[in-house]
Amino acid sequence: MNPYSILELNFGKGKIQKDKNISSYITLRTETVAEYFIEAETKEDWLTLFHLTHEHTIPLFIIGGGSNLAILQNKINGLVVRNLYVIKEVVNDTAQYVDLLVSSGYPMGRLVKETAEAGYEGFEYHLGLPGTLGGAIYMNSKWTHPLSYAGDWLIKGFLIDNEGALKEVDRNYFQFAYDHSKLQETKEFFLEGIFRLQKQNPAILKNRSQEALAYRKQTQPFGVATSGCFFQNISEEEKNRLGFPTGSAGYLIDQAGLKHTQVGDFIVSPIHANFIVNQGEGKPEDLIQLIHLIKAKVKEQFGVDLKEEVRII
Ligand SMILES: Cc1cc2nc3c(=O)[nH]c(=O)nc-3n(C[C@H](O)[C@H](O)[C@H](O)COP(=O)(O)OP(=O)(O)OC[C@H]3O[C@@H](n4cnc5c(N)ncnc54)[C@H](O)[C@@H]3O)c2cc1C
């Protein structure tokens, strides 16, 4: 039986799509087709999908909000699953804090707003972070003014391992660091997690959110097709070697004179040099060329090997 029939048999007609253009699910809007595509809405959907793809050796690729992806291929073989599993529930309520169970498909924007309004401290600086909670945990997405990571308040995670089994782990398991969680190595799926959030005055949290959003709007291009910061910031040692005031990759790219550089429809943003923007119908081959150009120029000028922050597929 082919993968399509196996998946259709389990999920019913119409749920699985073949050769689906997924560009609208990726914030950089690159034109890419998924061989098979489905949206997972429940825990059971996810468990079934992992079980089937493992049993029938079907390659599986997960998309949350698609906001940290640079897809450099015209087609992804196997099954692409978009995460629409959205639940949130207080599982423990004390005078000082709540333990909040949140599913991986929860949109970050909604989570930030709802927790701030409820007076639960922890996510408020992430207002304006696109994507899902799952993507943010996988990447340990951050805000740097002040420093705050998506994984900071996680106390327990529920994963699906590569054989489709459910697994409960504590926060140490994730080995959170800058742009890093262990899931990037294990390829396990973050299904949901429990976050311990201290109680705080909602007005204070709302204020912090608005400050973070205002800073974003001041320093980043808004309302454009992009995957956010494309390259990782450099280390403290490299920054000191170069005598630069900041380790921001955007600063290096700017200093290399690359703002406005364009290949096809992809351009280095004139507002923030670490943002690559798709101005229309950017093709994967143009993006590849622009990435090479940026890396080569920064290497030539500063001896720095820039590393991608976005996931290159
Ligand atoms: C305008 C803009 C601003 C941004 N600002 C920031 C910022 O301030 N800070 C920052 O750190 N990043 C930022 N980003 C990058 C991006 O938004 C974050 O990394 C975000 O958390 C990714 O979430 P996502 O759901 O979109 O992940 P996706 O892009 O869908 O996926 C990213 C990776 O995670 C994997 N993945 C997704 N969900 C799961 C899961 N549940 N379990 C296991 N693996 C999973 C995917 O397979 C993929 O490899 C920005 C991006 C944009 C476009």
Image (tube, helix red, strand yellow):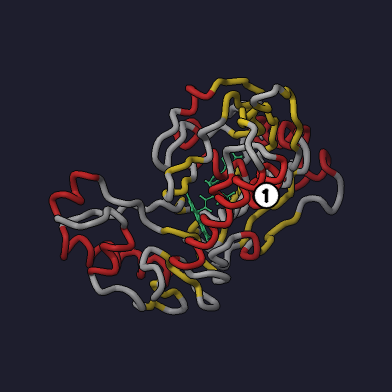
Task: Provide residue 131's location: percent of width, then percent of height.
Answer: 60, 52
- Counting every numbered tag in the picture gives 1
Q: Is residue 181 left or right of residue 298?
A: right
Residue 148 appears in the figure? yes
> Could you tell me which quadrant the N terminus lies in?
top right
Q: Is residue 256 left or right of residue 166?
A: left
Amino acid at pointer 1: Lys
Which residue is located at x 63 percent, y 36 percent? 200
Name the residue tied to disc 1.
Answer: 113
Q: Position of residue 57 (x, y in %)?
A: 61, 36
In the image, 129 versus 206, the foreground residue is: 206
Q: Position of residue 127 (x, y in %)?
A: 58, 53
- Residue in the foreground of this view, choosing between 174 and 244: 244
Left or right of residue 134, residue 299 in this image: left
Measured as percent of width and height from the top left, residue 142 is found at: 47, 46
Looking at the image, which residue is at 38% across and 72% down?
A: 268
Q: Nearer the viewer, residue 151 or 309?
A: 151
Residue 2 in view, yes or no: no
Vertical placement of residue 123 versus 288, above or below: above
